[in-house]
Image: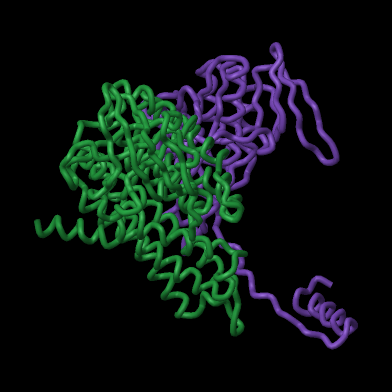
Amino acid sequence: MDVVVCVKQVPDTEQPIRVRADGSGIDEQGLNWILNYYDEHAVEEALRVRERHGGTVTVVCVGPPRATEALRTALAMGADEAVHVWDPALEGADHLGVSRVLAEVVRRMPHDLVLCGRLATDDNASVVGAALAEYLGLAQATAIAKLEIGDGVATVEREVEGGVEVLRVPLPAVFTVERTINEPRYPTLPGIMKAKRKEIRTLSLQDLGLDPAQVGAAAARVRYARFDPPPRREAGRVVTPESPEEGARLIAQFLQDTAKVL
Amino acid sequence: MEFHLTEEHRLVQQTAREFATREILPVASQLDAEHRFPTEIVQGLAQLGLMGVTVPEQYGGAGMDHVAYVLAMEEVARACASTAAIMSVNNSLVCDPILRYGTEEQRRRYLPVLASGREIGCYCLTEPQAGSDAASLQATARLDGDRWVLNGTKAFVTNAREAWVFIVYARSEPEPGPRGISAFIVERDFPGISVGKVERKMGLLAASTCEVLLEDCRVPGENLLGARGEGFKVALSTLDGGRIGIAAQAVGIARAALEDGVAYARQRRQFGRPIAEFQAIQWKIADMATRIEAARLLTLRAAWLRDQGRRCTAEASMAKLFASETAMFAAHQGVQIFGGYGYIKDYPVERYFRDAKITEIYEGTSEIQRLVIARNLLA
């Protein structure tokens, strides 16, 4: 099984995220960039497929030069190869543009299985995996919580409202994974040393024969209008009523007059 | 001059941080309360490569440098100082001298076992009557045919209860002082070595600290570590690396006190507002953070010097001195931020306070570090 995993580098959400004063985006100063958590699970699942069925694991990432570090994390976990795509024309590309680029990369390499995280924790869009399957013309299942590989077919489970949906999907296929699918391994120090010696191939749009006008900022159907920080949470108010009745009255009054939800 | 970590150093830091946060931090207080050796955690550290960080891959280690080692050490110590001490002894005081002074046979026999966490090691230098004045040690080593016979008592040996490998210093030559000392690798099942009293300590409660007794302990001739009579050199050079590790441990403890203090100051309300809004608290936090930053830089630089193969005795002592006093300062301020809640065991800051103190004592007291630093300037 040759497995391709598409990953994204995102800001570490353990740290405070600040919005730029002009609202044009988030302030990247001092941010810690990490491999998207969901993609970590996708890499782990790919490694498990390789352990059971043999084959290779290749990780692919579209993103600025710093994004190679996310690929290095995946290599340190045990992936065999990494491909990085960047081109200044991709600055401002939307999810569909990125999906087209990924499709072109995947098309050029052997792929029995393509895995992505269910979403990226920066914009929570959940678009790329599904769009990638469309552009590749492959079957897909999103947010899978279990994967079993059979002969030319995969059995996957999706956690749906009140139950589990079991799907049989012909391979090759694209799956996006839920975090419950596995527990990712920690990159070991020897793994990090091995990853250091592996080469990350960087491709430009030209290398892929893609037209910037069709995948770059110029083709983006989505543009960010403005970023706003979430409103500051105000300190709670404590009331000390004389009786339960008065307490109920005060709360009802608050819901009606201040919160305006009644 | 550049102040950023390489990609692989950041990955080591990240992997150590994730492991420490998920696997160590949640159980650290319990390990402390139960005085329990963290067997599973040590196995986990070994699987990551953290029990033999600088041991080359050919001997089963991670093949990384001291910068990677101190980055990982800080993360582990931030979660649990006891676990950090166990890791520090195995890496700095046991693997390192075997790697530097061991014969090829010794390296092949001991390093893979120690780096894989199958067994751990301990370091027997201190004696009841020879602490800071280590060169006055009284344990003896007498050659009997092709074997050494060791006698004496070693004190305050971290990891001794669990260890398989004991690095033992004993006087093999008639000269007094540093000249007559040799180093030996002693296995737990050699006849005549035993672990005595397990000390009851103030802190580092998840790690064992014991007396080690040598009673006509018979050691094969090939287990001499380094040259005969050169043991004190082995000890001093080993301590350079050890002190850098302790400095990193101290930075980790200090950071724990700072991070917990910041979180508590934001949430604890007095006089109608979070105490973080009071300057008295802000100044504590600023002083803690500033000293931690300085201590970390001293530590990283000492580690970097060691990686360059340069002499770093004074720098290692400066890092160890400043970082350990920073740990004590930060733990002290941390408890103060928590007030009464800092004095009870419901919050881990009480443990940081007990754990911080040892960093000013072991592997050379603060007084000895000042002596080393001054001698480097005055000699």
Instruction: Say whether residue A101 is left or right of residue B303.
Output: right
Instruction: Say whether residue A256 is left or right of residue B131.
Output: right
Q: Farthest residue to the top: give it.
A: A151
- Identify which residue is drawn at 18% across, 47% down: B177
Out of B70 and B345, give the one closest to the viewer: B345
Instruction: Say whether residue A181 is left or right of residue B77.
Output: right
Using the image, determine if residue A3 lies above or below residue B343: above
Residue A213 % position (x, y): 47, 35
Residue A208 % position (x, y): 45, 24
Q: Which chain is purple?
A: A
Residue A170 % position (x, y): 71, 17
Quarter of the figure with the C terminus of chain B: bottom left
Instruction: Say whether residue B258 is left or right of residue A174.
Output: left
Q: Farthest residue to the bottom: give it.
A: A242
Q: Is residue A198 visible?
A: no
Using the image, determine if residue B71 lies above or below residue B371: above
- Identify which residue is drawn at 19% across, 58% down: B373
